[in-house]
Amino acid sequence: MRTLTLDNVNPALLKVQYAVRGELAIKAEQYREALKTEGNGLPFTKVINSNIGNPQQKGLDQPPITFTRQVCALMEWPALAELAPQVFPEDVKARAKELRDEIGSIGAYSHSQGVPIIRKNVAKFIEERDGYPANPNHIFLTGGASAGVSLLINLLITPPKSGILIPIPQYPLYTATLAQHRGVPLPYYLDETHEWSTSLDTIEAAIEKAAKDGVAPKALVVINPGNPTGALLDEVTQEKLVKLCEKHSLVLLADEVYQSNLHQPVTHPFTSFKKIVRRLDSPIALVSFHSISKGVMGECGRRGGYFECTNISDEILALIYKMVSVGLCPPLLGQIGVDCMVRPPKEGSESYPLWKQETDTIHRALAQRTGIMAERLNKLPGVKCVNSPGALYLYPQLELPEGAIKAAEEAGKSPDTFYALRLLDETGICVVSGEGFGKKPGHNYYRLTCLCPGVEEYVGALEAFHLKFMEKYGGAASS
Amino acid sequence: MRTLTLDNVNPALLKVQYAVRGELAIKAEQYREALKTEGNGLPFTKVINSNIGNPQQKGLDQPPITFTRQVCALMEWPALAELAPQVFPEDVKARAKELRDEIGSIGAYSHSQGVPIIRKNVAKFIEERDGYPANPNHIFLTGGASAGVSLLINLLITPPKSGILIPIPQYPLYTATLAQHRGVPLPYYLDETHEWSTSLDTIEAAIEKAAKDGVAPKALVVINPGNPTGALLDEVTQEKLVKLCEKHSLVLLADEVYQSNLHQPVTHPFTSFKKIVRRLDSPIALVSFHSISKGVMGECGRRGGYFECTNISDEILALIYKMVSVGLCPPLLGQIGVDCMVRPPKEGSESYPLWKQETDTIHRALAQRTGIMAERLNKLPGVKCVNSPGALYLYPQLELPEGAIKAAEEAGKSPDTFYALRLLDETGICVVSGEGFGKKPGHNYYRLTCLCPGVEEYVGALEAFHLKFMEKYGGAASS
């Protein structure tokens, strides 16, 4: 008999690449295992996973919002409200009761589109954010934003050859999902010299190139705040992007999962694309994604999120419903998480003071760490780094010495992957090489999260490694 | 600009059909809404969703296993162990502590393949069940079995034309997922006259037909216990099926999610395909699926399950890992649910007596209801029904009068869909028409769950409706 080999499986899947959990992450996992044995000979005592925005992971330990966890505990075991009434604030008990009355058990499948009352609460949240109405029937709860993005890309890609415009650098979910569904990534480059801003001309050029290559562009992906860049779009650019989608009949896929991670909100505020589309009274089809994995929630493991459809016809909504119904429903505890995100404790309620303190602490710590890390990285020879105004990351550019580039070539790696591997080997810090996000030839980057609590020790290790690396490979920058 | 319409989206998705949540389920939802308004004029006071194996849904209210919920409540809010220690059994606190020490926060992403310690526990469960070793690295935790099936079908289907052998009747997840991924369903018919048994000849015939049609068969799906049939395979047939997979180089996809729903375990026991493959020392590639949504857990909304890969090479395992890593990880609380399923309280522990009582009650009630419903349905004119020895369903065949067949034709419906729609209109009971599962021409069926607690009232309504329907449309059976 013939066995299952790489030669007889779906070739599209072989092309999928997802660097966030790729070679570096796998090696980091091996080091973590190795650290458990004595005499492991490793030059570090712990592995720090800065490769992924995972605030509550071991070692980072960003505490969850207590309100969310209390509501979920009561949903898990409702008898607790009677068995230990004194340990739960009144508003938590009221919230859990309200949700239970509507949902029943969290062990039951819900409506495939998500619990109706939670979708209503999401719609209210959007209305209050934007000042324009939102329709609960146009909202789909999901198991994190990724599930929704994958569904939409699967929906939009049509044979023989169609593609989706994606920013470079991008979050690799987009190229991975496009490869899976045989879509063509149509890259447009962000402008690093202007804080990773988005230029309409580069998008127009990418559309022209697609036409020459015989690829039909179906949608434009915008990540705002940016990942990995942390950049925030200004409203003038957003308006132009909407107009561009009108002109080219593009669906706008707005990845807005970092909308509440703003470190410089006065100079770099967030405006949703929904608001822009409504303000312009534009007819473009827009799908906006949000998640409980980022922001102050950081509830990655719960798997929750939603997407809102704007200007999408009932027949397409019915098609999306059909597709999500095959997967039955998103995780109920992810859906409860969404409810807690869009309906946090109100001022004056019993839970409010603790909620306020917890969320303020998270916002402040992230903004501080991002600023300190950007400042110190920028002082290193051969490192340039935009001080991210949003999201959870920094994306430093590396100008590496010729010696390092040669050594990387000999090792069969891109220079930034080579750098990131050495960083992991010597410090236990796991980052993602710029290779995973896409880049112009000859450029080198890495993405690291700004989640590590002990910023002194952490940046100290980065600095010491970098200086040693530069010295070893010749010091002078390559260009 | 061009808007998004059914003409410019992925045509493969238009072909997807998923009857379990289709027309009937949508109408049931509308009735449920209508019942909230006075003077709705409906001839029933509640909607009963017998269309889906969803034991904990409102109205059915199968209670969850307390042990699971207590462990999860402590994972949600670990402070409860100190704040209300008296309300948790000692073994629950120990389990939660053990999991927390390994996992950390359930708000963090886990290993994409699932938490290592939980995969180890799944492996132990499989070893104890089968008497053969299991490797935690060959186990992937999932958000329910559906997610795993979808991934495997996506992996196996290769252009230009390949297909997967599926039983008819089948659980419509298979045809839906094949349509989505452009695979060809290769139906083989189960033998209703022999308790829906599986015949090797019909599978060989389906393979021959595929060859004539230029379709390469890649895998064989076996659902055991059957859905919708409830049938259990005997070991002799299982051995033949494994040999057939060897002969034709087919991957065996074993959907075993109902493995603990056995109503006649002495005459109709369950044997896993893993055990058969190991006993025969067969080299076939096998993927076995399990879930926390069925069995005694019934934790559908939590979204948890796993699949085990047998005789699958490291390079294919790495490919599967890469694909699941794009989705980051399965829901943590679904993973905890899997742990509770494969490691229930041990005899002698504080939680054991309640766990035993709860699980015995669920098993007994389901077996009783299945028997009573099968007996009474079989007494109705024009109804024949195998008394399911497993799973959660009955799948009665209907011999409908000519008048009903004509009326269905006029309404543009298949006769069984017409029957199911009338049943819903008149009783509020929602079932799935046989049309959704596939069938031989001229046959009519519906699938209903055996989960409704008030069996007298429920079967009474079914009987009264059926007699009235038969009378209205002419009484005499069509064939």
Image (cartoon, coloured by chain):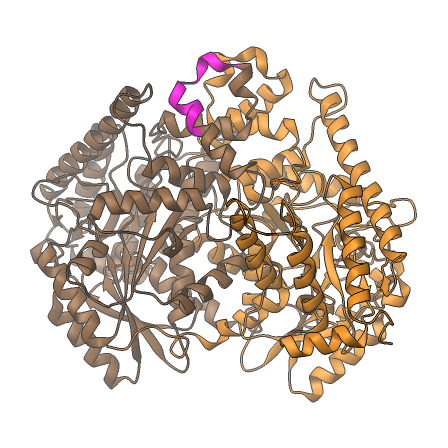
Chain colours: A orange, B brown
Chief secondary structure of the magenta portion: helix
Q: Residue furthest right?
A: A267
Residue interval drawn in magenta: B84-95
* Residue B39: percent from left, percent from top: 46, 30
Q: Is residue B88 magenta?
A: yes
Query: Vertical placement of B175 versus A32: above or below?
Result: below
Q: Would residue B466 be seen by someone viewing this image from the given angle?
A: yes
Quadrant holding the N terminus of chain B: bottom right
- Residue toward you, A49 or A208: A49
The answer to which quarter of the image holds residue A169 is bottom right
Query: Vertical placement of B34 versus B224: above or below?
Result: above
Left or right: residue A182 versus residue B307 is right
Q: Would residue A104 be seen by someone viewing this image from the given angle?
A: no
- Residue toward you, A401 or B308: A401
- Residue toward you, A254 or A230: A230
Left or right: residue A148 versus residue A343 is left
- Residue drawn at point x = 81 percent, y = 65 percent: A470
* Residue A162: percent from left, percent from top: 61, 78
* Residue A30: percent from left, percent from top: 53, 54
Left or right: residue B128 versus residue A411 is left
Count every numbered label the image shows and give the total.
0
* Residue A359: percent from left, percent from top: 75, 32
- Residue drawn at point x = 44 percent, y = 48 percent: B143
The answer to which quarter of the image holds residue A124 is top right
Q: Is residue A37 magenta?
A: no
Quadrant holding the C terminus of chain B: bottom left
Query: Vertical placement of B58 versus A329: above or below?
Result: above
- Residue drawn at point x = 76 percent, y = 57 percent: A465
- Residue toward you, A58 or A282: A58
